[in-house]
Image (tube, rainbow, N blue to C red):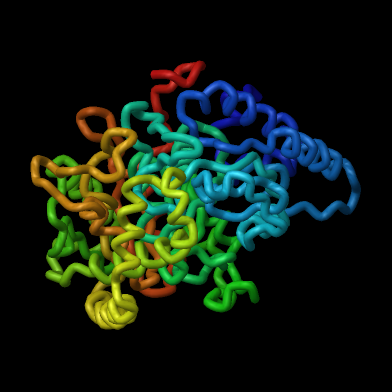
Amino acid sequence: MSDERLCWLPATELAALIRKKRVSPVEVVDAVLDRIAKVNPALNAFVTLTDAQARREARAAERALTRRGARLGPLHGVPFSVKDLVVTKGVRTTFGTPLYRDNVPAEDAPIVERLKRAGAILLGKTNTPTFGWIGATHNLLFGATRNPWNLDRTPGGSSGGASAAAAAGLGPLHVGTDGGGSIRIPASCVGIYGLKASYGRIPAWPPSGAWSLSHVGPMTRTVADAALMLQVTAGPDERDQYSLPAAGVDFTAALRGSLKGLRVAWSADLGFADAVDPEVRAICAKAVKAFRELGCRVEEVSPRWPSPRDPWETIFCGGIATRLAPFLARRGEIDAGLYRIIEDALKHPPTRYVQAWFDRLAWWEHPRRFFETYDLLLTPTIACPPFRVGLDNPAEIAGTPVPAYAWIPFTFPFNMTGQPAASVPAGFTADGLPVGLQIVGRRFDDAGVLRASAAFERARPWAPHRPPLDQEGAR
């Protein structure tokens, strides 16, 4: 099988081919590492490669295939990457900042530990903004990551290194994190699948600055790969006291089944979005028609919820500011926009942070009542197409000036509630830029979100669409 084909095969197929000895883990890892060498210089998706270690593990995985009675995990020999906010034993983890440029953790995060236990092979770490503070991907240590569909545009963030790697065929499985949309935003920007499972479904440790909002989870090219990733990483871990008990659900089996009769709400603005690009709105509205074709009862709604941006921003930015406060004397090593946020957050009285928590708890009443009527909520994933690389946030949407974070009104609310939510590729703008549709489920209904995502994928397959990278990684 050609190296090119191996790089684009989903993990589900790779795992089956490896188990049947039709391809070897060495072939797979070598093919992906060769493609990284060709493409990554243009994208800057990977910032640390564990290539020597990956090749050693691939050889060991190949030897295991020849041993009678060897116990092979469901991801035996399949490569994966980890966002540089997630700790990896013996592998540099910088959190996207010069302040931690030499940090080498002594322990794996639970998600990394479980992927390895399932037989997956770590390729390296992917780029992120400092502590995931924005929905784009650039930092003072490694620079900017670029969108494979247009190198002048951002791949989103804060899991932008992971999204660019997935979209460019640099491995099938990628670990991202999401404190305000950081899995779903970049998934939308590059046309891949991103799943933010229920809060606590996959244990997160050590806690991030935005720990009460932050999820860790899969970014893949197919829904089945994300389901398989969730299957091997979900479940409680004593290091994360908010991790959920085992769900007793086979997430891979949950992909099958009909959506007929489901009550589905579609909202283009949730009633509080500052502005939504008309092209994004139209592309998502067209994608929603697939759910009608699948037998769902779809209603267009404008729930008129009050915006939860202030409490989310207070909790999110306050947590990151607290983590970075000890480093304020090293101003030159902190992004200018982030430094301003830290200074501002540290001026707030403690009662403002506590009030934000009360406001968060009160805001839950709106989606709680809403999901008594509806099974799923559909929205655009983000309010605009991918913007210019290097910008922290877009200054305007379709000519309307907007403040920071106003372009992600659909993602951060569901970090406040902890509900499962995913971004599926919905289509492309006239300029060829990907647009995502968000699917939000009831509390703890990860299986429902996966089933809806898989049904949409079957109805509107996106895997055939690949970014226009040539062999050197340039457009």
> Where the N terminus falls, by quadrant?
top right
Q: Is residue 356 left or right of residue 110?
A: left
Q: Nearer the viewer, residue 219 or 22?
A: 219
Q: 415 above or below 353?
A: above
- Residue 475 x, y percent position in the rendering: 39, 19
- Residue 463 x, y percent position in the rendering: 43, 37
Q: 279 above or below 424?
A: above
- Residue 252 x, y percent position in the rendering: 55, 58
The answer to whether residue 4 is visible is: yes
Q: Is residue 160 left or right of residue 284?
A: right
Q: Is residue 139 left or right of residue 277?
A: right
> Which residue appears at 36% of the width and 66% of the height?
318
Q: Nearer the viewer, residue 323 or 128?
A: 323
> Which residue appears at 38% of the width and 33% of the height?
147
Q: 413 above or below 4?
A: below
The answer to whether residue 426 is visible is: no
Task: Find the residue positioned furthest to the left.
Answer: 399
